Image (tube, helix red, strand yellow):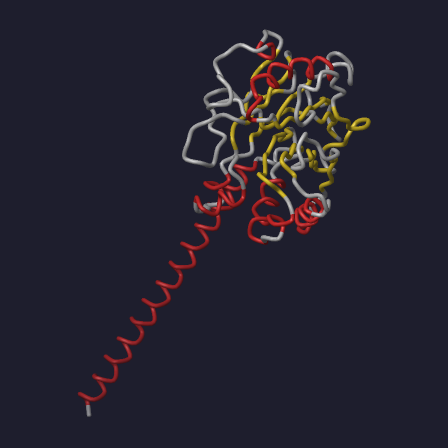
Amino acid sequence: MARKGRKRKNDNTKLLYLAIIIVVIIAAGYTQKDTIMSSVSNADVKDNNQHNSDLLKVGSFNIQVFGQSKSAKADVMNVLSDIIRTYDIIAVQEIRDSSGTALDNLIKQVNSDGSSYAYLVSERLGRTSSKEQYAYVYNTRTVSPVGTAFTYPQTSDIFHRTPYIASFKSNEGIFNATFAVIHTDPDDAANEIKSLYEVAEYAKGVLPADEPVIVMGDYNADGRYFDETSYVPLKSENYIWIIGNEVDTTVASGDNTYDRIVSTKPNIFYTGDAGAFRFDEVYNLTHEFAAEVSDHYPVYVFFKKDA
């Protein structure tokens, strides 16, 4: 009988040790999961940087043939919405949707989490039947449009898709700037980039002379379309190329700086922080899926709300 008692006690001890081991494993699992989730959250805050109330994130994004077909893909729209929410102002190019519903659907998706974004959109532009629109999508809680947006009144018909001009101010602070967005025609990029100087000089008259002008968009300013080392008037001492030749703005395996942000000098709001928003790396997407979102990375620059 004594042996049976000891055996029963040993069995109970083994069960107790086993239970402790299971509890430790489960606890470790939860701790690891919490650590991973914490790391993801911190990474998102660092990459989006939209929690710094003293800064505005401004940028440009060629969404690549954005129309009804792309807007019908829920997973793609989720990524596009996440990207847009990281910006206070983002100039969108290559909207190809004669129905006018794709952009509306995107903004509804952006605002589905309680965000408050609105947009300004141009008329359909282009010399062929494949016309495009520009749009400025902006966070109404941080910025407001100033005046009325309009297409550049070109007289020489240089631009295939005339630049779209709009001014914005910050709701807090003194930030005030005029923007022009462009998507050059690849086959005529060199001539259009040369003429962007005239657009920028014209835009200086929209707001008081000391307010910066920012010309951004898909310049097609690299590769076989444009010699990025060549001189154009927009490279004069009165301008700064915030997105320079060293930045890769393509999702493809190549290394080209098609997308640019150029500002008049001085720009008292410029922080020096700018680059390409590599959404595939930030959101851990496969290359194949990232290419469904766009073949371009959005470009960005952070501006101070106060000088």
State the residue at coordinates (65%, 13%). 197
Q: Position of residue 189 (x, y in %)?
A: 57, 21
In the rendered view, does 190 fall on the left or right side of 160? left
* Corner quadrant of residue 17: bottom left
Q: Nearer the viewer, residue 110 or 41?
A: 110
Q: Position of residue 130 (x, y in %)?
A: 65, 37
The relative height of residue 151 versus residue 234 in the rendered view (above or below) is: below
Residue furthest left as drawn: 3
Q: Nearer the viewer, residue 98 or 113?
A: 98
Q: How many marks?
A: 0
State the residue at coordinates (74%, 33%). 122
Q: Nearer the viewer, residue 157 or 35?
A: 157
Q: Position of residue 283 (x, y in %)?
A: 49, 45
Q: Nearer the viewer, residue 84 or 228?
A: 228
State the residue at coordinates (61%, 31%). 60
The relative height of residue 297 versus residue 258 in the rendered view (above or below) is: below
In the rendered view, does 91 fall on the left or right side of 222? right
Q: Position of residue 307 (x, y in %)?
A: 67, 18
Residue furthest right as drawn: 147
Residue furthest front as drawn: 128
In the rendered view, does 134 fall on the left or right side of 34? right
Residue furthest top as drawn: 237
Quadrant in which the N terminus is drawn = bottom left
